[in-house]
Image (tube, grey):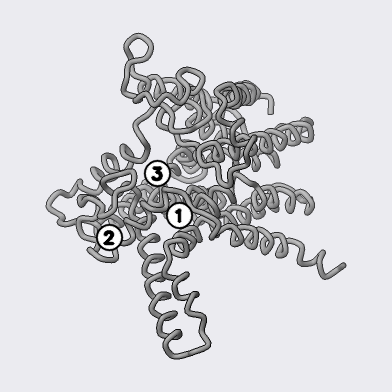
């Protein structure tokens, strides 16, 4: 018994890893075909002109629309797969007892897709580990520390997206969390800055965490360190694009690629792309482009900017006036972005989750901490469940008959979307009381 007590945390992580590995080969989403195609192009055609050349296999986007670091990760995994194919074939020729069917399995797209899922799988574990480190700093209760770690490791929203779906949204969350940990609990501001930039270079979704991060950075460090961090981060950002360019005649090309070919092309051009958010209550999943006019002839997109900007500004104002609300403020901004910006995908519902979980540890004035923290933990569980249902609604694997059909009723999707919005307003107006 003492053996298990001493190694309980390790066993939790091993169990979380086994759970994810067991799902790797079951299926994979359409998205992974893009990742494979981009990796194949980098492997076969080289890096130069990558973002300016149409993909050899087109599934959803004519041109690559993921940043350099994620594209490089896909390339590495594709190269590993090619190497494994060669090694398996050589062993098969040299060792008569070697099962030939294993060679065909390694050569299959299913095996390649499983390899492509591994970064997100390990990012899930990384998120759980960083959450545990935060918990050790914010709570002295070992049971609490292990509980909130488990709430990530065995959270269906996380492992469904990484191990089954195969998307990489946990990677930018992982990098952002490490960066924030270094900001809050160490003096390693350069390392933290670089890790945040790496998160953006995996996927621009990390940008939702930037407002609170920048304010906190300026509050902790002098202006000169802030300028140094910005310049170094900008340099790393710029240099990461260099191998992917055909030439350097236009010095602003990396920024043009990021804004036009990555940021603008990151999502399908509709008011909502499967997200259970505010816009489902307005038009459902009707496939209306977000550039279409809405109220007063103003487009859905601009209304999304106005509404989201309004809530972000109020959250920042409150954050500047209060203490111990870092995680809660990040949560509110990330949740507002998901709910009120247009073109949101269902998987972006993961962005707020780690931060309301962390806010449940320490984010409230003395005397009200116990009830407030339990309340936030409850909402984390509820939002995680809605996030999972949102993911499953967009990609119902495996199909579960009645449950799958139920999620396609407009009343159900509208109800879940409304619940998301109501939770946001409840928690938003409770901000100064937590």
In front of the other: 197 or 350: 350
Q: Could you tell me how many numbered marks the image carries?
A: 3
Q: Secondary structure at mark 2?
A: helix
Place residue 324 in its image quadrant.
top right
Image coords of residue 320 (percent x, y):
54, 30
Disc nearest the viewer among 1 and 2: 2
Which residue ends up furthest to the left in the rendered image? Answer: 249
Residue 41 tag number: 2
Q: Quadrant of the N terminus?
A: bottom right
Residue placed under numbered mark 1 in the picture:
195
Residue 145 vs residue 92, the one in the foreground: 92
Name the residue rendered at 50%, 38% in the picture: 394
Q: Position of residue 69 (x, y in %)?
A: 37, 56
For residue 32, above or below residue 61: below
Q: In this view, which residue lies farthest toward the top?
A: 296
Marks 3 & 1, CB-CB < 8 Å contact? no
Q: Tag 2 or tag 1, which sits nearer the N-term?
A: 2
Question: Could you tell me which residue is drawn at 45 percent across and 40 percent down?
Answer: 210
- Where 279 sits versus 143, above or below? above
Disc 1 residue crowd, few under 14, some 14–19, many 20+, Cα 10 Å: many
Numbered disc 3: secondary structure? helix
Say which residue appears at 32% left-offset and 19% top-offset.
292
Q: Tell me what residue is drawn at x 52 percent, y 44 percent.
A: 220
- Of discs 3 and 1, which sits in the foreground? 3
Q: Position of residue 256 (x, y in %)?
A: 23, 43
Give the label on residue 204, or none.
3
């Amino acid at each position: 018994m003492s053996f298990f007590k001493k190694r309980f945390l390790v066993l939790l992580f091993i169990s979380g890893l086994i759970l994810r590995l067991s799902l790797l080969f079951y299926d994979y989403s359409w998205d992974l075909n893009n990742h494979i195609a981009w990796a194949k192009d980098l492997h076969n055609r080289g890096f130069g002109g990558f973002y300016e050349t149409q993909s050899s296999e087109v599934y959803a986007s004519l041109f690559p629309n993921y940043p350099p670091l994620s594209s490089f990760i896909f390339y590495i995994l594709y190269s590993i797969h090619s190497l494994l194919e060669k090694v398996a074939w050589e062993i098969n020729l040299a060792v008569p007892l070697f099962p030939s069917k294993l060679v065909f399995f390694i050569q299959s797209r299913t095996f390649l897709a499983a390899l492509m899922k591994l970064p997100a799988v390990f990012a899930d574990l990384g998120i759980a580990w960083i959450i545990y480190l935060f918990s050790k700093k914010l709570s002295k209760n070992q049971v609490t520390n292990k509980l909130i770690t488990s709430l990530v490791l065995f959270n269906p929203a996380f492992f469904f997206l990484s191990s089954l779906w195969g998307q990489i949204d946990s990677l930018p969350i992982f990098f952002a969390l490490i960066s924030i940990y270094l900001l809050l609990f160490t003096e390693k501001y350069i390392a933290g800055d670089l890790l945040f930039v790496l998160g953006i270079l995996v996927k621009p979704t990390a940008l939702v965490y930037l407002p609170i991060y920048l304010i906190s950075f300026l509050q902790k460090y002098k202006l000169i360190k802030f300028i140094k961090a910005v310049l170094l981060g900008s340099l790393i950002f710029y240099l990461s694009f260099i191998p992917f360019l055909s030439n350097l005649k236009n010095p602003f090309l990396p920024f043009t690629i990021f804004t036009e070919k990555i940021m603008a092309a990151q999502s399908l051009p509709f008011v909502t792309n499967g997200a259970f958010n505010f816009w489902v209550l307005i038009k459902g999943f009707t496939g209306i482009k977000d550039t279409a006019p809405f109220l007063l002839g103003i487009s859905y997109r601009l209304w999304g900017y106005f509404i989201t900007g309004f809530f972000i500004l109020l959250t920042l104002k409150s954050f500047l006036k209060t203490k111990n609300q870092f995680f809660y403020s990040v949560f509110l901004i990330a949740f507002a972005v998901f709910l009120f910006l247009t073109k949101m995908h269902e998987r972006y519902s993961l962005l707020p989750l780690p931060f309301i979980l962390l806010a449940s540890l320490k984010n409230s004035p003395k005397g009200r901490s116990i009830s407030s923290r339990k309340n936030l933990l409850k909402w984390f569980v509820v939002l995680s469940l809605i996030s999972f249902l949102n993911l499953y609604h967009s990609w119902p694997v495996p199909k579960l008959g009645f449950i799958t059909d139920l999620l396609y009723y407009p009343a159900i999707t509208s109800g879940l979307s409304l619940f998301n919005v109501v939770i946001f307003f409840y928690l938003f107006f409770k901000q100064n009381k937590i």
